[in-house]
Image (spheres, grey):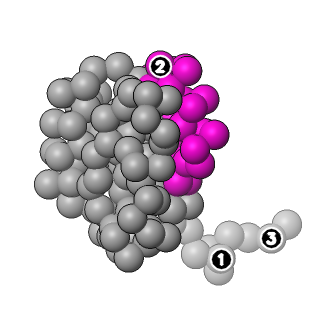
């Protein structure tokens, strides 16, 4: 999305080291507890002590819907730790949706206003075939 935002699937320990070396300071996990492989399947717990100095935030997002509350929670979490962040879920799809929605809110994008157009419909029988 931008040079400060990384979006994708759940990171490995190797990924976390790379992200930390690139300046990522906050990891936002959009998975719920049923999607994790075990208690150590969180960046905060999986990374060896001292390897990654990142803040870990869990904002469970259901695949079927995204709420304003979840987006507000994301905004609050990122405001606490300014800088680069990683937004992830199991496969990256929900994280991408969250990132796009946050960008739209940050830039105050709204619904598009379509220009008024006039269309003239002509039936096939009204067109002569020469």
Q: Vertical placement of 63 versus 57: above or below?
A: below
Quarter occupied by residue 107: top left
Nearest-to-viewer mark from 1 and 2: 2
Query: Is 16 contained in the magenta span?
Result: yes
- Residue 90 horizontal/vertical position (percent): 51, 62
Residue denoted by label 3: 129
- Characterize the local packing of mark 2: few (<14), some (14-19) or many (20 or more) Cα atoms within 10 angstroms: some
- Residue 128 horizontal/vertical position (percent): 73, 70
- Characterize the local packing of mark 1: few (<14), some (14-19) or many (20 or more) Cα atoms within 10 angstroms: few
Q: Secondary structure at mark 1?
A: helix
Q: Vertical placement of 24 versus 63: above or below?
A: above
Residue denoted by label 2: 23
Find out whether the residues at labels 1 and 2 contact each other: C-beta distance under 8 Å. no
Residue denoted by label 1: 124
Q: Residue at x 32, y 42 (%)?
A: 56
Q: Earlier in the sequence, mark 1 or mark 3?
A: 1
Dot label at residue 63: none
Distance from Cα at disc 1 to Cα at disc 2: 63 Å
Nearest-to-viewer mark from 2 and 3: 2
Q: For the image shown, how many numbered marks are present on the structure?
A: 3
Q: Is residue 129 left or right of residue 64?
A: right
Q: Secondary structure at mark 3?
A: loop
Q: Is residue 103 left or right of residue 1?
A: left
Q: Residue at x 55, y 21 (%)?
A: 21
Q: Name the residue furthest bottom.
A: 125
Nearest-to-viewer mark from 1 and 3: 1
Q: Name the residue furthest front.
A: 49
- Residue 15 horizontal/vertical position (percent): 60, 39
Distance from Cα at disc 2 to Cα at disc 3: 67 Å
Q: Vertical placement of 99 versus 106: above or below?
A: below
- Residue 105 horizontal/vertical position (percent): 25, 37
């Amino acid at each position: 999305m931008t040079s400060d935002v990384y979006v994708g699937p759940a990171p490995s320990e190797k990924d976390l080291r790379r992200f930390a070396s690139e300046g990522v300071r906050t990891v936002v996990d959009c998975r719920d507890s049923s999607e994790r492989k075990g208690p150590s399947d969180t960046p905060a717990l999986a990374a060896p002590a001292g390897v990654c100095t990142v803040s870990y935030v869990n904002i469970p997002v259901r695949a079927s819907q995204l709420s304003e509350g979840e987006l507000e929670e994301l905004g609050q979490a990122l405001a606490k730790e300014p800088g680069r962040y990683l937004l992830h879920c199991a496969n990256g799809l929900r994280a991408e949706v969250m990132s796009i929605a946050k960008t739209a809110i940050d830039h105050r994008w709204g619904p598009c206003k379509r220009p008024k157009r006039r269309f003239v419909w002509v039936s096939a029988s009204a067109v002569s075939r020469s």
